[in-house]
Amino acid sequence: MKVCLLSSVHPCFDVRIFQKEAKSLAEAGYQVTLVAVADFKEKVVDQVRVLGLPQFRSRALRPLNWYRILRIALRERADAYHFHDPELLVVGSMIKALTKSPIIYDVHENYPQDILTKEWIPRALRKAISEAFRIFEDNMVKRMDGVVVVNEHLSERFSQKSHVVTVSNYSRIERFACADRGPEQDDKRMRPYFVYAGRISDDRGIYECVQALETVRDEKVELLCAGRIGHVGNQGFRALLDGDQSGAPFQYLGLLPSEDIPALLKGALAGLLCFQATPNNVLATPNKLFEYMSVGIPVIASNFPFIRQVVSEVDCGLLVQPDNLEQIALAMAHLLRNPEDAARMGRNGFRAARERYNWLLEEKKLLSLYEALLGSRSSA
């Protein structure tokens, strides 16, 4: 059976799309083609055929990729199409009408809530646009054959669909099991560090963590940050990312290859997850929480409902109010000065990631959805 995963926004090796879903489908025996943003035209990676789309600096040019996706989808003649961006809802509906194949919509976030904090949308228009998109998405979802969501909050929102499946962003623990150690510094000495790896923007709380670490007053400790840069309006943070560290305990490593991330994480004192309290972040199930747990390091994380549930239940880190620099600093100081406690939390997180918060458990739900949608076709 041939399946086609589609994204006009995400890079082709996105963790959820490629590392988890595409690879799981390929390992289960499906013939998988992934169409997403890439700097190449075509290659096969881990049994997944990847077709690259250009990345445009201007949002106004992204509809060009919608046309490319529609054209490729029709050419591929897949047995199912699985798309990952709300901007492809109309394209997905067209693919369904033209191919008669099942269509799956993968909802990564609460997009109406996310619109409320989009910097490129005038503030006065955000609420109206958010509500308009909510109505549009609710209506378009009714045309989909399956809906995949990342948490129960989104599952409740789309509960009118018969094929809504919650496939959480738990980690492929085997991807992190071989991690050896963190990066060496230029002076060949290993300095202790806190780490953040993921999309970089103002709402991720990284700058707040840098400010908090400065108050800890331990010159031997720094914050290492890696990932793709999104919207950064904070000029102090922008200066750090541009290399003007001015003595700050911070180092930006750039966008690292995915295979380098496990070692970077495993060498850290703790993983930072101090997302700021935007409407979407408060309800998020962040992938990096489970990545930190999968390498056995404690977390310092925002005291939001889902994060609090996991961290408190597992006892794998410390919760903070993400805009409270004193709380973040106290959490950092505690882990620095109590290495036995930090190691215990790390072990707790690793055990929970292996036994419960593990992608191998989640992929069964994804494969069950595909079996429900394609089972009759495969036996025909």
Image (cartoon, rainbow, N blue to C red):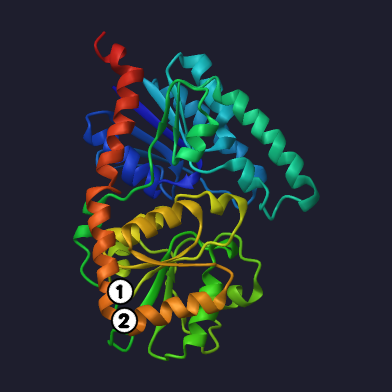
Above or below residue 144? Residue 350 is below
Above or below residue 280? Residue 2 is above
Q: Name the residue under label 1.
A: 342
Locate residue 136, reporting x and y percent: 65, 29
Q: How many marks?
A: 2
Work out which quarter of the rendered image holds the C terminus and state it: top left
Please say if the residues under marks 1 and 2 sit with CB atoms less than 8 Å apart. yes
Above or below residue 94? Residue 204 is below
Outermost residue to the right: 124
Q: Mark 2 points at which residue?
A: 338
| Spatial CA span between label 1 and label 2 | 6 Å
Q: Give the residue at x 38% y 80%.
A: 334
Q: Which of 330 and 255 is in front in this view?
A: 330
Work out which quarter of the rendered image holds the N terminus and state it: top left
Above or below residue 221? Residue 278 is above
Disc assigned to residue 72 = none
Outermost residue to the front: 313
Residue 123 in the figure: left or right of residue 209: right
Q: Which amino acid, mark 2?
A: Asn
Locate residue 157, reporting x and y percent: 55, 33
Q: Nearer the viewer, residue 11 or 127?
A: 127
Locate residue 182, reporting x and y percent: 28, 73
Residue 11 in the figure: left or right of residue 30: right
Locate residue 154, reporting x and y percent: 51, 37
Task: State whether residue 13 appears in this view.
Answer: no
Task: State whether residue 326 appears in this view.
Answer: yes
Q: Which amino acid, mark 1?
A: Ala
Q: Give the residue at x 61% y 47%.
A: 114
